[in-house]
Image: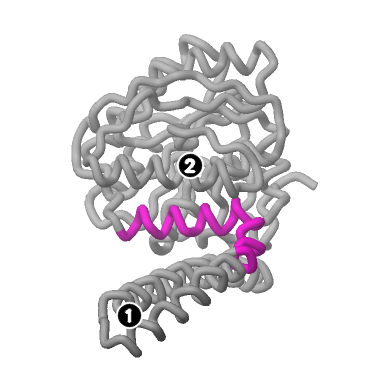
Amino acid sequence: MTPELSIVIPCFNEQENVRAICAAVTVEAARHVRSHEIVLIDNNSTDGTRDLMRTLCAEDPRIRAILNNRNYGQMRSPTYGIYQAEGAAVIGMCADFQDPPAMIGEFVRQWRAGAQVVLGQRRSERASPLLGATRRLGYAFLRKFGDYPVIPGATGFGLYDREVIDTLAAWNEPEPFFRGMLVESGFRLAVIPVDRPERAAGTSKNDFAALASFALSGLAGSAKSLLRLPILLAFFAAGIALPLLVAATIATVTGGSCLALFGFACGFGMFAILLLFLGLIGEQVRVLAERSRNVPLVIEAERINFPSDRARPAARTLIRRP
């Protein structure tokens, strides 16, 4: 029987949390829906997470597991797990309790009231001043140049209607910026404020390199209008470079050096901007190349407790029903 609600929980080295999050989600789901399933998707954990998943699946047939054959990153693996869920509505959430299971009831209420996408918006972020400033700058940049509105503090924790899931799966995005795709799709959207609790156990797997990679992929996929921006910057840079060249020439003739150094500094600044946008273009070219390869989001090593009629997808398109 098709469950009314699927809860998808991506994991990577979450042996301290996976049993507790499944228990908490089961209690909340039982209070608010007629039937549910939990889909755990493991991104090639190196601790005891996979063994715990197998145990949980043996204890409760409503818990299903997908074990990836390697780590596919924090964009592809969670999205693939969402596409494998069968519920009339799907909730995506983290395993570490930073996405509180207590919000499940409110998400379901908003969905039953007509919202097709319900997103939790964090009231605040616990981060260093530098990381907080970087996030604010990134959101401001996306608001200015993005192809669709950005919801600050929305990490993707939320509920998505079956129609939304099937529509997004058909897009065949090789690097799915899922939280952006939810907004881009234009379905009826509700935003719910969420207080972010502390991580229950373990440590965050999102180091600076992982966050930077995620941000670049998201920016490349959600701000395609940036491709036109380097042309405007080129005219702007030329308008600055010409008077600087004149000033540097005058400084050289009169024996001065300050203006020349200033000119070099501006030149390096323009070069840095050029490299930034060339990098964004490179990211978009990379995504196009990935799309042309027709590769799946992940390759499964094992799947547990899925009904026999929910066959493993073999092709690039991940929707199971024609």
Residue occupied by mark 2: 140
Q: Residue at x 40, y 27 (%)?
A: 122
Part of the protein shown in magenta? 209-232
Please state if 258 lies on the left or on the right of 249 as rendered.
left
- Residue appearing at x 64%, y 68% in the figure: 231
Q: Amino acid at mark 1?
A: Ala
Mark 1 and mark 2 lie on one chain; the one further toward the N terminus is 2
Residue 242 seen in the figure: yes
Front residue of 195/80: it is: 195
Q: CA distance from mark 1 to mark 2?
A: 34 Å
Q: Secondary structure at mark 2?
A: helix
Mark 1, Cα crowd under 10 Å, few <14 / some 14-19 / many 20+, is some
- Residue 180 placement (x, y as % from top left): 58, 43
Q: Measured along the vertical axis of the image, is residue 187 above or below residue 230?
A: above
Tell whether position 221 is magenta.
yes
Which of labels 1 and 2 is toward the front?
1
Q: Which mark is residue 288?
A: none
Using the image, determine if residue 94 lies above or below residue 280. above
Residue 124 left/right relative to 127: right
The residue wearing badge 1 is: 260
Q: Nearer the viewer, residue 161 or 273?
A: 273
**Residue located 59% across and 55% down the image:** 221
Residue nearest the viewer, comparing 139 with 55:
139
